[in-house]
Amino acid sequence: MSNYKDLKKRLLKNKGIRKEYERLRPEYELLDKIISLRLEHNITQKQLAKKLNTKQSAISRLEKGMINPTITYLNKLASAFGKKLVVEFK
Protein backbone atom coordinates (compact mmCIF):
# COMPACT_ATOMS: atom_id res chain seq x y z
CA MET A 1 0.00 0.00 0.00
CA SER A 2 2.92 2.35 0.52
CA ASN A 3 3.47 2.43 -3.26
CA TYR A 4 -0.03 3.86 -3.70
CA LYS A 5 0.52 6.37 -0.91
CA ASP A 6 3.86 7.43 -2.37
CA LEU A 7 2.37 7.81 -5.84
CA LYS A 8 -0.58 9.80 -4.48
CA LYS A 9 1.77 12.09 -2.55
CA ARG A 10 3.91 12.69 -5.64
CA LEU A 11 0.91 13.32 -7.89
CA LEU A 12 -0.71 15.75 -5.47
CA LYS A 13 2.36 17.99 -5.68
CA ASN A 14 1.08 18.93 -9.13
CA LYS A 15 -1.31 21.89 -8.75
CA GLY A 16 -3.61 20.76 -11.57
CA ILE A 17 -3.90 17.23 -10.26
CA ARG A 18 -4.42 18.46 -6.69
CA LYS A 19 -7.16 20.86 -7.83
CA GLU A 20 -9.02 18.08 -9.68
CA TYR A 21 -8.54 15.69 -6.75
CA GLU A 22 -10.11 18.23 -4.39
CA ARG A 23 -12.96 18.90 -6.83
CA LEU A 24 -13.83 15.19 -6.97
CA ARG A 25 -13.26 14.46 -3.28
CA PRO A 26 -16.93 14.81 -2.18
CA GLU A 27 -18.08 12.36 -4.85
CA TYR A 28 -15.52 9.74 -3.90
CA GLU A 29 -16.18 10.19 -0.19
CA LEU A 30 -19.89 9.59 -0.85
CA LEU A 31 -19.17 6.48 -2.90
CA ASP A 32 -16.83 5.20 -0.20
CA LYS A 33 -19.54 5.76 2.42
CA ILE A 34 -22.15 3.91 0.36
CA ILE A 35 -19.85 0.92 -0.17
CA SER A 36 -18.81 0.95 3.51
CA LEU A 37 -22.43 0.97 4.67
CA ARG A 38 -23.30 -1.92 2.38
CA LEU A 39 -20.35 -3.94 3.65
CA GLU A 40 -21.06 -3.04 7.31
CA HIS A 41 -24.60 -4.35 6.82
CA ASN A 42 -23.13 -7.44 5.19
CA ILE A 43 -25.38 -7.26 2.15
CA THR A 44 -24.60 -7.80 -1.50
CA GLN A 45 -25.27 -5.36 -4.29
CA LYS A 46 -28.12 -7.62 -5.35
CA GLN A 47 -29.69 -7.54 -1.88
CA LEU A 48 -29.38 -3.76 -1.73
CA ALA A 49 -30.89 -3.47 -5.20
CA LYS A 50 -33.88 -5.49 -4.06
CA LYS A 51 -34.41 -3.14 -1.09
CA LEU A 52 -34.35 -0.18 -3.48
CA ASN A 53 -36.50 -1.85 -6.13
CA THR A 54 -33.74 -1.62 -8.73
CA LYS A 55 -31.20 -3.92 -10.40
CA GLN A 56 -27.81 -5.05 -9.14
CA SER A 57 -26.22 -3.42 -12.19
CA ALA A 58 -27.59 -0.03 -11.04
CA ILE A 59 -25.92 -0.47 -7.64
CA SER A 60 -22.68 -1.47 -9.36
CA ARG A 61 -22.78 1.65 -11.56
CA LEU A 62 -23.52 3.78 -8.48
CA GLU A 63 -20.58 2.34 -6.54
CA LYS A 64 -18.26 2.84 -9.52
CA GLY A 65 -19.28 6.49 -9.81
CA MET A 66 -20.80 5.98 -13.24
CA ILE A 67 -24.11 7.64 -12.34
CA ASN A 68 -25.04 10.78 -10.43
CA PRO A 69 -27.75 9.87 -7.95
CA THR A 70 -30.52 12.30 -7.12
CA ILE A 71 -31.19 13.51 -3.60
CA THR A 72 -34.35 11.39 -3.68
CA TYR A 73 -32.33 8.29 -4.55
CA LEU A 74 -29.75 9.03 -1.85
CA ASN A 75 -32.57 9.47 0.65
CA LYS A 76 -34.00 6.05 -0.30
CA LEU A 77 -30.50 4.60 0.03
CA ALA A 78 -30.05 6.12 3.48
CA SER A 79 -33.41 4.70 4.56
CA ALA A 80 -32.39 1.25 3.32
CA PHE A 81 -29.51 1.39 5.80
CA GLY A 82 -31.64 2.82 8.60
CA LYS A 83 -29.89 6.17 8.26
CA LYS A 84 -30.98 9.73 7.67
CA LEU A 85 -29.58 11.68 4.74
CA VAL A 86 -28.01 15.00 5.74
CA VAL A 87 -26.83 17.45 3.10
CA GLU A 88 -24.95 20.56 4.15
CA PHE A 89 -22.87 23.36 2.74
CA LYS A 90 -19.73 24.39 4.57
Image (cartoon, rainbow, N blue to C red):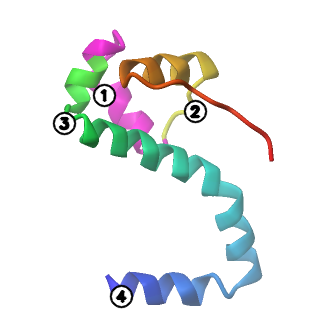
Work out whether mark 3 precedes mark 4 in sequence or the reverse, and give the earlier one.
4
Whole-percent x and y of residue 35? 36, 43
SS class of the residue under badge 1? helix
Q: What kind of secondary structure does the magenta stretch mostly adopt?
A: helix
Q: Give the range drawn in magenta.
A: 50-65
Asked if the stretch drawn in magenta spans residue 74, the answer is no
Q: Residue at point 44% right, 18% down?
A: 79
Left or right: 9 in relation to 32: right
**Residue holding disc 4:** 2
- Mark 3 vs mark 1, foreground winner is 3
Asked if the stretch drawn in magenta spans residue 54, the answer is yes
Q: Report, in whole angstroms, how far the alpha carbon at label 1 lies from the one at label 2.
A: 14 Å
Whole-percent x and y of residue 12? 63, 81
Whole-percent x and y of residue 50? 26, 14
Left or right: 19 in relation to 79: right
Q: Which amino acid does label 3 sit on?
A: Asn
Left or right: 89 in relation to 3: right
**Residue holding disc 1:** 57
- Mark 4 vs mark 1, foreground winner is 4
Q: What residue type is labelled 4?
A: Ser
**Residue holding disc 3:** 42
